[in-house]
Image: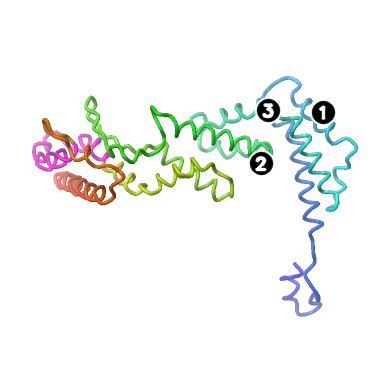
Amino acid sequence: MTGQTWKRQVEDAWRGEPVDMKYLQGFKKRLEEVLSLKQLGPQIGLLLNERGVEAEVEKTIETAMRNTAVLAYNPFTEHNWKSKVLVAEKALDHIIDRTIPVLKSRLQPNKLESNHLTADLEKYKNFLCRAKIKEKLQNERCRETIQAIDDPSDSIALETKGKIMVLEQKRGTLNVNYSDRLLKLLKEVRQLASLGLNIPSKIINCVNQGEKFYRYGVVLKQIAHFYNTIDQQMLPCQQALMLDEAIAFERLVIPKKNEESAITRVTWEDPKQLEDFIAKLQAASDKLANHNRFLM
């Protein structure tokens, strides 16, 4: 206010340096911390739905804060306040550990309508915003992700020496070996990194590998979706008229007898070969799509 608004006043302009409001800012932060502690009991009680748990949380916090004037803010004794908060949080560890799985279950996307998600996050924001709880949630999520990367039967990581696409013979569907879970992980890590959070090196390496081939994965998924749904877009009476384009596309993905198809030879680790193959696939799918649109 003194640095900007008052400077524009012709009369009674502020003279001197802008007012230092560090004390008020610190006091405001203390009030927010006290309010957050006060609301922790009701929020845990709401989540656990256990008799007496809210009173137990409140009593634990009161015990940790005994003989502390919580509103007597002083920047020189701030370290004492922080140590009291740490004592309270440590004493609540066993309750918080029981609460986190309940919250995660309640916030599962498949259990929530999208328009209720914001309301639920708002409802539990004081619980979610506590540093210790965020740390626990992040550590647990990192452990789950590393397990998914290390899973030999169904790894989330991109296998660069593996096939880029596989034709499932039984259902006749074309699948890209670039999992939706990896796409989701790329977005999550971008968001967490923008918040300045520490991410384990194994996850970073997995994401870097995924980012390297991201644009190829997206294009291949679009082509596979087109191939898997083209029969729904064609009228039965027109299928014979599109036979040449369909055969040209399938030659790239379906092997001839005693021969390999192109998709069995191409791997992620050869970018030139990969780009050439994608260009051929794209051209073949475009011809098929354009002919189909023309006939429609």
Binning the other alpha carbons within 10 Å of mark 2 as few (below 14), some (14 to 19) or many (20 upward) gives few
Labelled disc at residue 46: 3
Q: Is residue 49 magenta?
A: no
Q: Which of these two is toward me, 232 or 69?
A: 69
Q: Position of residue 50 (x, y in %)?
A: 70, 20
Q: What amino acid is labelled 3 in the image?
A: Leu
Q: CA distance from mark 2 to mark 3?
A: 17 Å
Disc 2 marks which residue?
129
Hey, which residue is sitting farthest right in the picture? Answer: 67
Magenta residues, as a range? Answer: 224-253
Q: Is residue 227 magenta?
A: yes
Q: Residue at x 55, y 43 (%)?
A: 199
Disc 1 marks which residue?
59
Binning the other alpha carbons within 10 Å of mark 1 as few (below 14), some (14 to 19) or many (20 upward) gives few
Q: What amino acid is labelled 2 in the image?
A: Cys
Q: Secondary structure at mark 3?
A: helix
Q: What amino acid is labelled 1 in the image?
A: Lys
Q: Earlier in the sequence, mark 1 or mark 2?
A: 1
Q: Secondary structure at mark 2?
A: loop
Q: Quadrant of residue 103?
A: top right
Q: CA distance from mark 1 to mark 3?
A: 17 Å
Q: Earlier in the sequence, mark 1 or mark 3?
A: 3
- Colour theme: rainbow
The mark lying in front, picked from 1 and 3, is 1
Q: Position of residue 153 (x, y in %)?
A: 38, 27
137 over 288 or under it: above or below: above
